[in-house]
Amino acid sequence: PTYVTMEPFDKLRDYYYRRFVIQSPLKSKKARCKVAGITAIDGMLVHVRDIRLWGWFYIEVLKGKFLGRIGEKIDLKKGYRPEQWKIAFPHFDIHLVFHRLRPPPTDHYISAITFLTDDVDGFVAGLPAFQRSSFAEDGVLVFGRFYAFLDDSGERAYRKGSRGLLRSVDHITLGVRNVENAARFFCGVLGGKLEKIDDVDPANPNSSMKLWTANFGAFGIAFVQGIDRREVSHVSVFTNKRGNGAIQHPAFEVGGDLSTFCSYAKANGMRFRG
C-alpha cells in the first residue's frame, strides 16, 4: 500500500483521539524550515479496521519499532476507549487506532498528523484570531477535513533503535475544491513557500488537475484540485466523496536504496501503482 485512499476522521476532537498522538524528532537540524516555525511532519494518527493486520504490516514488514499497546476498554464513567498501538520509525511515528463503535470508512484512514515546531506558544500566538481560538479550545489546526496537532521539536529517547524501512514523511497530498483557499491557509497562515502547477496535463482533452504545494523545507504539503473537461477528474471524484481537505496520500522517504526497498516490498506482497 504505497498509495492508499484516506481521509480525516469526523470525530477527531474526541479526547481519546488527542491523548495518544506520537511525537518524533527531525531528520536533522539543517533541514529545519524557519519560515513558519513548522519543522517536520512528526507522526500520523491512523484509524484501521483490522489493527492486528496493520500492526503486523508496520512492525514485521516495514520493521517499525513497537512501542506498546493500549487495550480496548469500556469505562462506565469515562466511556469507551479504543485499542491503540504505537509504532516508531526513524523520523516519524504511526499511531494505530481501532474503534469498534466507530469503524473508519476505509481500511487505512489517516485522521490527523502532528507538526513539529520550535515554539508552540509562539507559533500559536502568530495565528489569525479564529485559528488561535480554535486551537486553544481543541488543540488542533483545522482546514476543512484536514486536522493537525502541534508539538515541540526535540529528540525522543523512545525512538532510539528504530530500524524502520520508512525513514520520514516527505509530503502529504490533500484533495481540495479550491487551491487558492488552501494556499491562503498553508502558505499565508502557516508560512509555507508556494510552488504551483496550474495544469499538470494541458493536452489531455478529458481531465487534468491543478497541483500546488506549500514547501516547508524538510517536508511539503501538496493540494490538488480537479480540472473537469469531457470527464470528471479523478481528483474531483475523490474530493466530492471525501470532503475538502481530505488526505489523499502520504509520501514516505525510504531508508537506503529505493530499488532495494521496492524489490523487498514486492517480495512481501506489496503492489505498486504508477
Image (tube, helix red, strand yellow):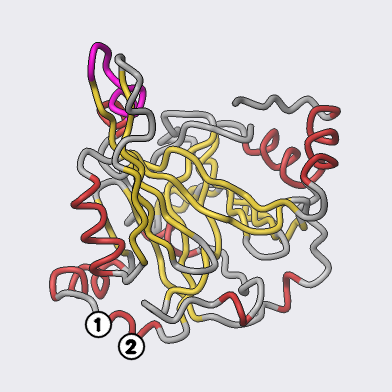
**Going by the image, does 258 lie left or right of 118?**
right
Which of the 4 image quadrants contains residue 22? bottom right
Q: Is 43 on the left-hand or right-hand side of 166?
A: left
Q: Which disc, if any, is residue 126?
A: 1
Which residue is nearer to you in this view: 73 or 261? Answer: 261
The residue under the point 29% across, 41% down is 198
Of residue 44 and residue 227, the one placed in the foreground of this image is: 227
- How far from the left and from the top, in percent, is residue 43? 55, 60
> Of residues 179 and 5, which is closer to you in this image?
179
Q: Measuring 32% from the left and 28% from the top, which residue is drawn there?
A: 202
Residue 203 location in percent, x, y? 34, 22
Relative side of 244 to 103, left or right: left
Residues at circles 1 and 2 in contact by the CB criterion of under 8 Å:
yes
Query: Which amino acid, by three-letter code, is at mark 2?
Result: Gly
Whether residue 9 is visible to the viewer of this picture, yes or no, is: no
Disc 1 residue type? Gly
Q: Secondary structure at mark 1?
A: loop
Q: Quadrant of the N terminus?
A: top right
**Residue 75 position within the rendered picture, expressed as x and y whole percent measured from the top left:** 46, 53
Which class describes the residues within 10 Å of circle 2: few (<14), some (14-19), or many (20+)?
Answer: few
Q: Which residue is mark 2?
A: 122
Q: Please state if 64 lies on the left or on the right of 72 as rendered.
A: right
Residue drawn where x is 68% and y is 56% of the image: 87
Which stretch is magenta? 229-238
As for residue 80 lying within the magenta part, the answer is no
